[in-house]
Image (cartoon, rainbow, N blue to C red):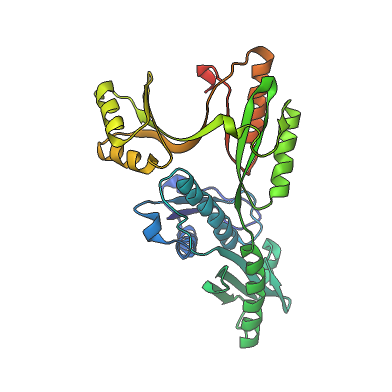
Amino acid sequence: MYPYPTPRATATRNKRDINKLKLNQRSTEIQRLIGRALRAAVDFTELGERSITVDCDVIQADGGTRTASITGGFVALAMACQKLVDNGLIEKMPLHRYISAVSVGVVDGVAMADLCYEEDSAAEVDMNIIMTDEGNFVEVQGTGEHGTFTQEQLLELLALGKKAAGELGNVNYEVKIYEGYGIGGSAVIVKTLTDNKNRTVDYVRTAMRKCGGSLGNAGCVSFTFTNMGVIVIERTADLDEDTVMEYALEGGADDFLAEDDAFVVYTSVSNFSAVRKFLEDKGLNFFSAQIEMLPQNKITLAGDDLVKFNKLVDALEDLDDVQNVYHNVELPEDEE
């Protein structure tokens, strides 16, 4: 796992020192801290021989860069692992605990949590606390900025940090799937990952309504789709179509399609991992390999209807909670 923190917790945004191809000492220290924290959550046996890069980019710095990067980085890590599970690349989530972090400190003699930049700059004691959802500590960093601090202050800050980090760790993410109708009788399925299903369903409903669609009940269109494994293989000059088709069928694929710049292999969900590994072992390079919801039949839209439908898909994909949008519209090649 390789976290890249940038740029720092200051009132003014610094330039990314990664652009110079060399991290400064402070960024290196933060990177290692984030990495240690995230690795504490991972079962590497389940993850297998994979590397996940977490890029922590500070958009607006106001104190707590380290702890915000750890908490946000864990959310990103969980989403990446969930995608591995959804795509059939691993059997179950490789995370055996949740991680959250919070800054605490003593400012003007008062213990405080989640310090802003002004509070952090004036703190007599500054501390970062990283915890699991089980209430155990991963790491504690504490400094007496203007001298020493007492054991009583230490215990008070640990208790305050445990309470604050515990509230962050209580956030639970779940996969929610919504179904509805777009313009011209089109069918739309929206897959989301959310910590607040009420917020997410409201956003999805609003986006669909504004673009001429409507949210339906569970099952209203999903019966017209089939879950399939889809492996897209790079087509090169030295790769023969018959050979790839032979590999695909030998590996257990259900169907094979040759396109101008790629070969597409379709598998059942249960055979997806085995087929993917078989083709990997044959040395084939993939553009993508994932589980998708494929429409059993497609419809065609044109003119204003097609423009409105594209706006609907764009609006849904722009929502932070949305992971994938599936539909049954045959798009022109330059829009796929």
Residue 184 in sight in this render: yes
Instruction: Write the residue at 63% across / 44% down.
Output: 321
Task: Tell me where residue 115 appears, x and y as whole percent.
Answer: 68, 66
Q: Which of 287 and 144 is in front in this view?
A: 287
Residue furthest bottom in the image: 151
- Residue 299 sits in quarter: top right
Residue 237 in sight in this render: no
Q: How many marks?
A: 0
Instruction: Write the residue at 61% across / 87% down.
Output: 151
Instruction: Write the residue at 54% across / 21% down.
Output: 335
Task: Tell me where residue 120 appears, x and y as whole percent.
Answer: 66, 67
Viewed as shown, does residue 118 lie left or right of 86?
A: right
- Residue 28 sits in quarter: bottom left
Instruction: Write the residue at 57% across / 68% down.
Output: 133
Task: Tell me where residue 87 appears, x and y as whole percent.
Answer: 45, 43
Q: In which quarter of the image is the N terminus?
A: bottom left
Q: Is residue 224 above or below residue 48?
A: above
Viewed as shown, does residue 244 lie left or right of 16?
A: left
Q: Is residue 122 above or below residue 204?
A: below
Q: Is residue 183 above or below residue 289?
A: above
Viewed as shown, does residue 258 lie left or right of 178?
A: left
Task: Tell me where residue 43 appears, x and y as whole percent.
Answer: 42, 62
Q: Which of 175 and 11 is in front in this view?
A: 175
Q: Nearer the viewer, residue 110 or 51?
A: 51
